[in-house]
């Protein structure tokens, strides 16, 4: 996270805890620098979400440890999700080997943005599409780009979750 992004996180903390004087006072710049040095490796979006989640259950501002702990938990979930996404993609590719080379990154991005539960739905949808496409090709019908399936899956899953 950049210093500017961290400044935005500090503003969010101050907005969530307005009467607590977070980073106020004569050593505000030193405090800012110390906090930034400890949290700069935390993803900006994760840091903001951590503050929002923390604020729902607490009446005092978070510590460095509170934000960093949420970051570590999110990293572990991300590793698990990425492993599961890899497994699903290999399965889909085993059914339908005609997937464009650049689709792995797009598939991973879609699944990651949708989250774990919805990523399973996308994978299941795409696996079924792959099976259907192979059957269609065996009967003489043409090739359908995987990118079109992914776009349709994303729209369908997002549509069902609104």
Image (spheres, rainbow, N blue to C red):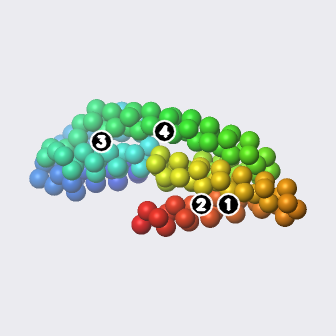
Would you say the residues marked 2 and 3 are in contact, meaning their CB atoms lie under 8 Å apart?
no
Label 2 or label 3, whichever lies nearer to me, is 2
Determine the CA span between mark 1 and mark 3.
47 Å
Q: From the image, tell me which residue sits under label 3.
A: 32
Residue 106 horizontal/vertical position (percent): 64, 53
Task: Specify the quadrant of the image occupied by residue 162.
Answer: bottom left
Q: From the image, tell me which residue sits under label 4.
A: 78
135 relative to 70, above or below: below
Please identify the residue farthest to the right as the structure is shown: 140
The answer, for residue 66, to whether it is visible in the render is yes
Dot 2 falls on a residue whose secondary structure is helix
Dot 3 falls on a residue whose secondary structure is helix
The answer, for residue 109, to whether it is visible in the render is no
Would you say the residues marked 1 and 3 are in contact, meaning their CB atoms lie under 8 Å apart?
no
Label 1 or label 3, whichever lies nearer to me, is 1
Q: From the image, tell me which residue sits under label 2.
A: 153
Q: From the image, tell me which residue sits under label 1.
A: 149
Label 3 or label 4, whichever lies nearer to me, is 4
Label 4 neighbourhood size at 10 Å, few (<14), some (14-19), many (20+)?
some
71 relative to 150, above or below: above
């Amino acid at each position: 996270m950049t210093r500017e992004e961290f400044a935005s996180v500090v503003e969010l903390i101050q907005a969530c805890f307005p009467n607590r004087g977070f980073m106020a006072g004569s050593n505000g710049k030193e405090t800012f620098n110390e906090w930034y040095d400890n949290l700069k490796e935390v993803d900006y979006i994760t840091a903001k979400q951590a503050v929002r989640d923390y604020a729902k259950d607490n009446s005092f501002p978070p510590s460095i440890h509170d934000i960093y702990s949420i970051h570590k938990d999110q990293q572990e979930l991300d590793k698990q999700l990425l492993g599961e996404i890899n497994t699903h993609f290999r399965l889909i590719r085993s059914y339908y080997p005609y997937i464009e080379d650049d689709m792995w990154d797009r598939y991973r991005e879609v699944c990651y943005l949708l989250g774990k539960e919805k990523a399973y739905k996308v994978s299941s949808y795409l696996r079924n599409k792959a099976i259907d496409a192979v059957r269609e090709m065996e009967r003489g019908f043409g090739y359908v780009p995987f990118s079109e399936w992914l776009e349709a899956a994303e729209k369908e899953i997002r549509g069902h979750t609104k």
